[in-house]
Image (spheres, rainbow, N blue to C red):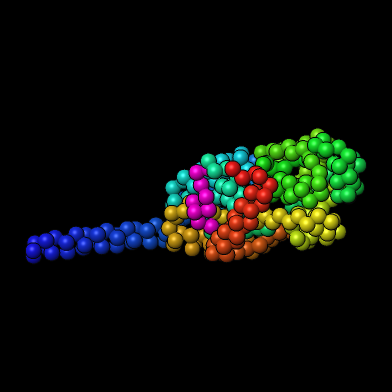
Amino acid sequence: MRIACHRRSFVSKLVASGILVLGLAGLASAQDYPARPIQLIIPFAAGGGFDQTSRNFAQALGEVLRQPLAAINVDGATGAIGLTRLAAAAPDGYTLGMSPAVSMTSEPHRNRNLTYGLESFRPVCQVFDNIFALAVPRDSTYRNLADLIADARRNPGKVSYGTAGIGSIPHLAIADLEVAAGIELLHVPYRGDGPMQVDLLQGRVGFGGVLPSSFIAQVRAGNLRLLAVLPEQRHPSFPEIPTLTESGFPVVQLSFGGLLAPARTPAAIIAMLEAACEKAVHSPAMRTWAAGANQVLNYANGQGFSARLARDSAAKAATLKRLKLAE
């Protein structure tokens, strides 16, 4: 009996020692972090507004952490390909990702074959809000949203529009608009808003769901015109452009996003990244770039970002079910 008790005591001490050693090793790792460059996965194509936001944030975050962030584009499937890679990455803080909420809160409902969900990530911080808009090329005959709706009613299924992909924020909003206005449109999905910009400018699609920060130069040059914005508030840089609701159609789609790490990344490293993230978002360089690009920055810590993602996931599930876009 005593031998069994001693044996249990010995095993307990070994387990406790192992936990202590692992804890100390994790603490030492966090204290040394980051000791080498960090890879930042951008799950959309290069050249678009999200890519620009991510790369400027990577530069600002790298300056705070005193290690460079190597940004790589892993695009396709509305961000799902890049996020799948991030979810499978080593949880050591050296592979991070930037993502809009839609890839986490919409795609898992739309595609049940995905191997990731919200639980696959540790939200580090929210970085931005995106205010999407409907835009037409310079020579378009659509002077306002009413013109577009009228043409779509005359020509069901023939008015085309481009988005960054199936299930993207513009796609969901325009699908809602079809229902609200009683029209049928032709969706042309792309692998990001960068490639879509080319066809939109050349008039190969009738209109597009765009992020103004992606197209600011074209808007200012008059090559693109904005007809309406998708959220409940107007864009601060384009206060003259009405919302869809103000235009007579009760459609609202929100977009936001930020920095993610694989789910099992140690809490100590997440805390360091969260603190660095706040400094990066509020840095003069990031603020100056955002003002020039008409990008809306909106920092929230990991807890706030996580809570907003959970709410948006529930809302997107309901929208996708109603539009019969969920599997």
In the rendered image, residue 305, in percent from the top left (x then y), is placed at 58, 61
* Viewer-nearest residue: 106 or 163: 106
In the rendered image, residue 53, in percent from the top left (x then y), is placed at 66, 52
Numbered disc total: 0
Left-right relation of 75 to 85: right
Residue at 43 percent of width and 54 percent of height: 264
Residue at 83 percent of width and 38 percent of height: 156
In the rendered image, residue 41, in percent from the top left (x then y), is placed at 56, 46
Q: Quarter of the image holding residue 301?
A: bottom right
Residue 120 lies in the magenta stretch: yes
Q: Quarter of the image holding residue 6?
A: bottom left
Work out which quarter of the rendered image holds the C terminus and state it: top right
Left-right relation of 24 to 80: left
* Residue range corresponding to the magenta coloring: 114-123
Residue 8 lies in the magenta stretch: no
In the rendered view, would you say 25 is above or below 146? below
* Viewer-nearest residue: 104 or 28: 104
Residue 270 seen in the current view? yes
Left-right relation of 76 to 270: right
In the rendered image, residue 46, in percent from the top left (x then y), is placed at 65, 41
Q: Quarter of the image holding residue 313?
A: bottom right
